[in-house]
Image (cartoon, rainbow, N blue to C red):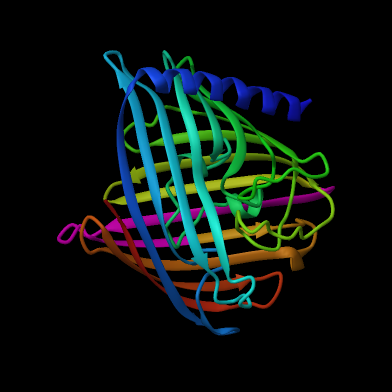
Amino acid sequence: MAKIILLLGMFLLASVAAAVAAAEQPTEFLYKELNVIGGYSRNNGLVGKNRYMLKNSAGFEYFRKFSDQYGDHLTLDLQVRYSYDSAENSKEAHAVEIHNAWLEYKLGLGESLIIGHFDPAFGLEPVVDTHSSLLQTLAMHSLGYTKDWGVGYKTLLGDFDFQIAAQLGSGMPLYYYDHSYMLTTRIATPMQDGQQLGLSFAYGQTLTFEQERTMPAPDLMNEYSEQKKLISLDYQTPLGPFGFKSEIAVGDKEGDSVGGALAEVSYTLPDNQNITLKLQTTYWSDNLKDSRMTDGTIAPVVEYKINNEWSFRTGYFHDFKAMAEKDRVILLQLYYYGL
């Protein structure tokens, strides 16, 4: 049933989008993107990526809005990267990654429909831009990915923001197998002066892959989908000169109790607002009853905005708990994003 609803929603929205696009005038931008990252791991020596699949890559983002005299009605976003993973062999090192690939149609009065590859309605990920950052949310731990293929709906419930999404449960690849699907929903206070509190739920069966890529098709890690039931609470706010983000998620994965938390503090230097200092702590357990199934990391990061297009970031990632072997990693990143 979930698959039928998903496919029907995608067809209806695509039909509406095509009709609207034919009648409206577009505003469009084409951004170029370059991500160069490297560093040193105590366990693995020189590294070209971190555990969240931030690889050396080059790509683009095509952003287009269709409007008429009444305002914007349709938005298109396509972000594609060609990536190189130095940790893989020559056959597996090269890949195409589709990050954003969605159409959003505004219905009016705060309502909209979205189709394609976009953020699930769960946790901090829908409201925090992490696609180029060294610091990520809990999404890779909780759901196993940051974006997924499907359809979504946004509206206002009184004074609250409300989102719901029905997706394939596959993450980056467009892949359906073993009845996989993911249903997510998030209700939140309106974003006001940088402050928001959100409550999210997730239910479905997700797939896990050996590689994080769209093409060539990645290899399944397991020959079955994994059932997940999760609840999350997220909060972000300014604290005087500081910024604060936090997220907690708990639930069930294939009968095991799972859960974790994230806290992040940021500070932009008042005398040089191109420099931001960040400190993040993350904790996640794949089995709350087994201390060996726990990851925990503390990471100070320095971000320097060279100009409107170039940024430099460096971070130190120190594991205080690890399911495998504890590691200490220093990462350097040069990032370009501009017209």
Does residue 52 show up?
no
Residue at horizontal 47 percent and vertical 57 percent from the top: 81
Does residue 60 show up?
yes
Residue at horizontal 57 percent and vertical 28 percent from the top: 152
Indicate left or right for 192 with 229 as reference. Answer: left
Q: Which residues are magenta?
A: 254-280
Residue toward you, 328 or 86: 86
Q: Quadrant of residue 220?
A: bottom right
Looking at the picture, how far across and down is residue 311, in whole percent? 29, 63
Looking at the picture, how far across and down is residue 48, in whole percent? 50, 75
Q: In the picture shown, does residue 114 fall above or below 255?
A: above
Residue toward you, 76 or 119: 76
Q: Residue furthest left?
A: 271
Quadrant in which the N terminus is drawn: top right
Looking at the picture, how far across and down is residue 111, in whole percent? 47, 18
Main SS category, magenta section? strand
Q: In the picture shown, does residue 142 fall above or below 71?
A: below
Q: Quadrant of residue 227?
A: top right
44 in magenta = no
278 in magenta = yes
